[in-house]
Image (cartoon, grey):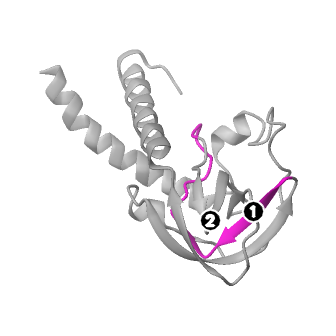
Amino acid sequence: RLTHRLKRGFHEMTRQLIEQRARERDMRDGHPCDRRHGGPLQGRRDRPEPLQILNPVAEKLFYADAHLRKFTARVLSCKESGRLFAVTLDRTAFFPEGGGQSGDIGTLGGARVTDTREERGEILHFCDAPLVPGAEVTGELDWETRFARMQIHSAEHLVSGHAHALWGCGN
């Protein structure tokens, strides 16, 4: 009986959480977890410094299809950032860091994407090689990593949701 209630409640809770997170992301820069922990760069010395890149907001393909593995996009900008290159696209399936979840990794136009972050409303893809602005590129997610993170993230929501329902614990 409890298993049936958990299964039924899981689907509705997941749908509500996805809609809520999408609204939160669209309403403000960053995520509450980033602010609570002092920002996405705190304690991460291997990360490049934030950049000022002013481009149109990328179409977030991951909201329409969380299982999209490969896509094409146009490079809007490519700026050197330490040993990496911060690339913005007109559309992306790479999920940026947020909500306690690491940013996606994979490849973009032959370059390795080592991190993805959203800063000032823009999604930055940190690549190990430069990409040419204006070029059309193919992006491919490291699907094993993405899928494992999706499963872990969903499990964390289930556990914290039930802890809240049973014992009133906040998250």
Residue at the image point whose x is 28% and y is 44% from the top = 12
Callout 2 amino acid: Gly
Callout 1 amino acid: Ala
Q: Is residue 93 magenta?
A: yes
Residue at the image point whose x is 85% and y is 63% from the top = 80
Judged from the image, the secondary structure of the residue bearing numbered disc 2 is loop
**Residue placed most toward the observer, 105 or 112:** 112
Q: Which mark is residue 110?
A: 2
Judged from the image, the secondary structure of the residue bearing numbered disc 1 is loop
- Magenta stretch in the rendered image: 83-101
Q: Earlier in the sequence, mark 2 or mark 1?
A: 2
Vertically, is 104 above or below 62? above
Residue at the image point whose x is 25% and y is 36% from the top = 9
Residue at the image point whose x is 79% and y is 36% from the top = 44
Q: Is residue 95 magenta?
A: yes
**Residue placed most toward the observer, 65 or 25:** 65
Are the residues at dot 2 and dot 1 in contact (C-beta closer than 8 Å)? yes
* Residue 27 picture location, percent across and down: 60, 60
* Residue 89 picture location, percent across and down: 64, 72
Farthest bottom residue in view: 134
Few, some or many residues within 10 Å of mark 2 (<14, 14–19, 20+): some
Looking at the rendering, which quadrant does residue 34 occupy? top right
Q: Which mark is residue 129?
A: 1
Looking at the rendering, which quadrant does residue 98 occupy? top right
